[in-house]
Image (cartoon, rainbow, N blue to C red):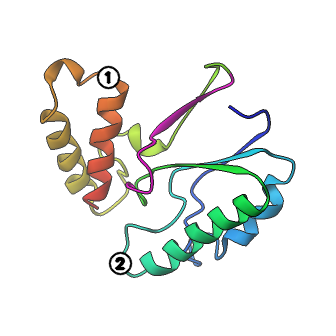
Amino acid sequence: MPEHVSIFSDTHLGRSRWGLPSADMLRPLWQGSTHVVVNGDVAELHHPRYRRSAEREVLRLQELCEADGVSLTLLSGNHDPYVSEIRHLSLANGRVFVTHGDAIHPAIAPWSPTAAVMREARRSALAALEPETHGHLESVLRATQHGAAAE
């Protein structure tokens, strides 16, 4: 992993009332970094109302990082479950573990009106996997990804 890493989370691009209105606002924060990690919920890709602007802002983020010579890793979260297949990172020779918080609670976002739906989708996805893998990190994260998509 590169030497200078900046980690951001929950930027919610594309939904200006709740998140950052523009990827350009992040640019000053990664100056001096060689790598940017967005730890889930980079954009409001799950919501039809905001999806188009969210997609534009994710593309803009990619363009800005490329222009600055900064590599970019996007981890998926509950608002962008399929932005990336990456659900966790291990940094600093395994001393730092990074994952989005949606993997921690079985309901993914227990405060959400759709928490029960997400919990059931996560449970079903986990049940579809081999029983001996249910306790494995990758299995839990994959089930969480499917649960988040049910929101």
User: Could you tell whether 102 is left or right of 64 in the image?
Assistant: left
Query: Magenta span has 73?
Result: no
Which residue is more in the foreground, 105 or 11?
11
Res 25 quadrant in image? bottom right
Secondary structure of the residue carrying numbered label 1: loop
Q: Which residue is depicted at the point 73% across and 71% down?
A: 24
Q: Which residue is mark 2?
A: 48
**Which quarter shows the N terminus?**
top right
**In the rendered view, does 35 fall on the left or right side of 108?**
right
Q: Residues within 10 Å of mark 2 (few under 14, many from 20)?
A: few
The Cα–Cα distance between marks 2 and 1, rounded to whole angstroms, is 32 Å
- The vertical placement of 6 against 91, above or below, is below
Residue occupying image coordinates x 55% and y 59%? 42
The picture places residue 148, in percent across and down from the top left corner, at 32, 53
Main SS of the magenta part reads loop
* Viewer can see residue 96: yes
In the rendered view, tell whether residue 66 sits above or below residue 140: below
Furthest residue in direction right, as rendered: 32
Q: 23 and 65: which one is in front?
A: 65
Give, as a three-letter code, the residue at label 2: Pro
Q: Which residues are magenta?
A: 81-92
Instruction: Kindly identify the amino acid type of the residue bearing the numbered disc 1.
Output: His
The residue that label 1 is drawn on is 136
* SS category of the residue bearing label 2: loop
Whether residue 106 appears in this view of the structure is no
Query: Does the magenta segment cover residue 84?
Result: yes
Q: Position of residue 41 (x, y in %)?
A: 50, 57
